Amino acid sequence: IVAQRYNVSREAQDEYALISQQRTAAAQQSGKFDDEIVPFDATMLVKDKETGEVSEKQVTLDRDECNRP
């Protein structure tokens, strides 16, 4: 849809996404986001792959963990 509507090729979109992810990783490593993100506690659900049992684990989130450099 983006390629047709805005005349941007899939390859150009993929290249932009890769560069964006690399920039985010570099910024995280250099601490550029440290003053922008407030750590907070959360409960994470963890599923045991063998038994299927789900348990809770307390974690502190202090950065964007979805970056894919």
Image (tube, rainbow, N blue to C red):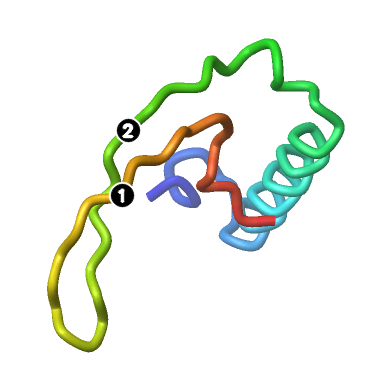
Residue 55 point in image, percent of width and height: 19, 59
Q: Which mark is residue 47?
A: none
Is 53 positioned to the left or the right of 22 in the image?
A: left
Quadrant position of residue 62: top right
In this rendering, position of residue 19 left or right of residue 1: right
Name the element at disc 2: strand
| Towards the viewer: 48 or 32 | 48
Q: Which residue is at 69% across, 11% downward?
A: 35
Comparing labels 1 and 2, the label whose residue is closer to the camera: 1
Please give left or right for residue 53 compared with residue 19 in the image: left
Q: Position of residue 65 (x, y in %)?
A: 53, 44
Compared across the picture, whether 55 is left or right of 17 comes to left
Question: Which residue in the rendered view is the most extreme toward the bottom?
Answer: 50
Q: Which amino acid type is marked by label 2? A: Ala
Identify residue for label 1.
Answer: 57
The relative height of residue 13 versus residue 47 in the rendered view (above or below) is above
Where residue 36 appears, x then y in whole percent?
63, 13
For the point 15% across and 84% down, which residue is it?
Answer: 51
Name the residue at 71% across, 19% down: 34
Q: Earlier in the sequence, mark 1 or mark 2?
A: 2
Q: Which residue is mark 2?
A: 42
